[in-house]
Structures are given as C-alpha cells and as structure tokens.
Amino acid sequence: MKLFKSLLVAPATLGLLVPMSSNATEVNLNEIANYSDVEGIEFVNSFETVDSDEESLLAGGEGLVEDSSYDGGFSETTTASFGVDFYLGAQDDEESASGAETDASDDALTFGYSLGIGLNTSFTGEDSLDITLDAGNSTEGVAEFDGNTNGDALTVDGVSYTFPVGEATFIVGDSTDGSALFTTACVYGGPGNLLDDCANVNAGITGGAATLGASYDFGNGFTAATGFQTGSEVTGMFTDETLDAYAFNAAYIADTYGVSLTYGIVETSSINEDKFTALNAYYTPEGYFPSISVGYEAGDIGGADASVDEKTSFMVGLSWDEVGPGTAGVAVGHSNTIEGTDEAYQYEAYYSYDINDGMTITPLIFTKDNVTSGLDDTTGVMVKTSFSF
C-alpha cells in the first residue's frame, strides 16, 4: 500500500518538472567564449555572402567553411541534438511471505534523470560521424526505464563513422553496438527495459569496445547485415585473449509486415562461446486494430551442463498509434530464462503523449513474476518526462 500512497504525490511533482523545461536551452555565451579561440573567426548571422579571406563559422554551430565555397546558406556538416529524461516512480518488490521488507528502498518514491547529447557530422553528404555524450543518475526505483547511471559528469558513450562503399554501408566505432546496422522486425515501442528489444536480447550483439559492421540493401524490402565487436581494445582484435562477438542479420520489410532473423556468437572464454538465434516479426493492420510484434530467441550456452545449457527469451506486444492524443501499448514476455527454471514473465502497459513539440510524457505500469519461493512479484508504477531540443 505504501507504493500507491507515495504515487499520490506524483502529479504534483510532475507539475514542478514542466517549468524546468523553459530553461533547457539557455546558453552562457561568455562561458563558451572561454573555451574558444575566437580570434580569426568571423560570425555570420545573415544569408548575405560575406567577402573575407578568413574561414567563417556559421550561426548555429554548423561548422567552418571556406569563403570561396560559401554561398550564403547554412552549412550542413554538423548538427547537435539534446535530450533530457526525468524519471519519477516507485517499485514494490522483494517482500517475504510474512510481509517483511527486504529492501530499504522498496516502495520509495524516487527521482532520476538522463542527459544525452548527439553530435553528427557529414563530410560527403553520404557518410556520418556520430558522437554521443551521456550523463545521469537513474535510481533503483525507476530502473525499468534503463536511464544513465554514470553520474553527473558527461562521458563519451560512443563514437562511430558510417560510410558507403559501392552499394554497401559500413560502420566502424568505439563503444558502439555490433548490431548498429541490423534491422529487427518489431514495431513495439514500449519504454520498459526488459521487453524493448523484442526478445532479440543476445543475438543482436551490443556493448562492444571496438566495432566493425556492414549492411546491404537488395531492394524490394530485403536487407542483410553483419557485425563484429571486441570485448576490449587492450588485448586487440581477433586474438585469443579478446572475447569477441559476431552476428548476422537478414530482414524483409513490406508495407504492413516484416520478418527478421538474427544469429550471434558471443565468446565467453578462450574455449567457450554462446550461440543465439532470434526470430522477429510484426504485422500492422489497417484501421483501428493494433499492430502486433512477436519475438523469440533461443541460445546454447557453451561449457554449461547439458541440463542447463539452453537460454530463451520471448515477447509479444500490441501497439496503438492513435489513442486520444497519444500512443499506447501492452506487452508480455520473459528474458534470458535458463533451461529447467520457471519463466519470470513481465506484463506492462504504457501510454505516451506529446505536451508540445519538445516534451513528451510516458507513464508505465508493470508487474514481473518473482520465481523465488516466498517472495512477492515486483510491481512498478513510474512516469518518464522527455525533453528534446
């Protein structure tokens, strides 16, 4: 009961968060100047051609251009995007059969945030250099939103460069997912962490140190992609000391449906590796009927005993694109269930609606089976407020 008493104050707290968005884009130009050498840089604030022998920095931070090629328009080389998520919620779990609390933070109303900055530059119009910076202090009570937990200091979350070679597309990067170019046939857009990968949990390899991937679009909806990632840059690539991961993806996407197959190999030691196969599909009917997404993954755990060497994940989700002013969805599934153990199913429902062009509110409620004898199931009620600018 403490969980739901705590949530009575949630609407009032959200009301306090809304005014905070008005200050999101304030910029201290004096502080920026302290980090810049502005000598020899000309700031252009109009579309009129400027005659100068020096390079011009176009308004909006789009990058330096040579005056000989500057025609008065904005450069398209560099863009920046910013996003902030506020999390508010509570989670009720881990009560013993007698009703005693086993976690001091249980039922507590908690708050957290995530900040993300994306920088993108194109040198040819067909390539893309991407840098992601993150910060955040998402807490246990709202952990299902999978927010950043690296603290208040900005850290580099990933660096990647995507470029074409003939008809194919390649990507190289650091701290980048090996599955970055994969196509997973799923249209469920729930905010919960357990089911948002549509059961493609391990086959679509993620969390790489150094990454290399490629994709090819055959046309008519058919695509194929492959990816490779290392577990560490220190021990090198393709070495016995490095735990690498490899994956392949094939997909067919039509107007109202799609299907994809992903196969991944993840090295867990110098002699063992896990192998996973994920199958995903979706269908989006016309009219007021919801779209449906289904995913299933089966894995073989290398080096494990025969009685516990299989791992499975499953999900099915329904999505409505128009429910009043927003979108809604429900889903059920389990993740990384070891052979011979009970599936810890999670059931979730969410509703997402735009307050304005740069602000979205997404409430989420979920319950997850607790397969440990004597412990209650986990229940969570939380709200995410997202700002983009």
Image (cartoon, rainbow, N blue to C red):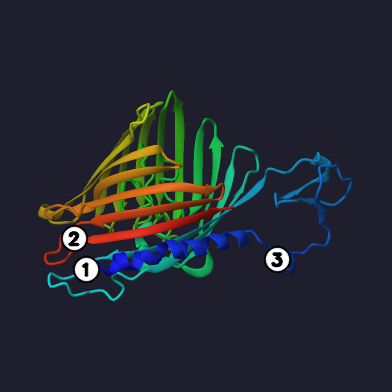
Q: At which x and y percent is residue 54?
A: 85, 52
Question: At 88% from the left edge and 49% from the top edge, which residue is drawn?
Answer: 52
Residue 114 to residue 222: above or below: below
Q: Which mark is residue 370?
A: 2
Mark 3 neighbour class, 10 Å CA radius: few under 14, some 14 to 19, many 20 or more? few
Label 1 vs 2, first from the N-terminus: 1
Residue that numbered label 1 is attached to: 94
Contact (Cβ within 8 Å) of mark 1 with mark 2 = yes
Label 3 vs 1, first from the N-terminus: 3
Front residue of 237/131: it is 131
Front residue of 205/328: it is 328
Q: Please name the amino acid that badge 3 sits on.
A: Asn
Residue that numbered label 3 is attached to: 28
Residue 60 to residue 185: above or below: below
Q: At which x and y percent is residue 389?
A: 59, 52
101 sits left or right of 151 in the view? left
Q: Please name the amino acid that badge 2 sits on.
A: Asn
Q: At which x and y percent is residue 160?
A: 53, 50
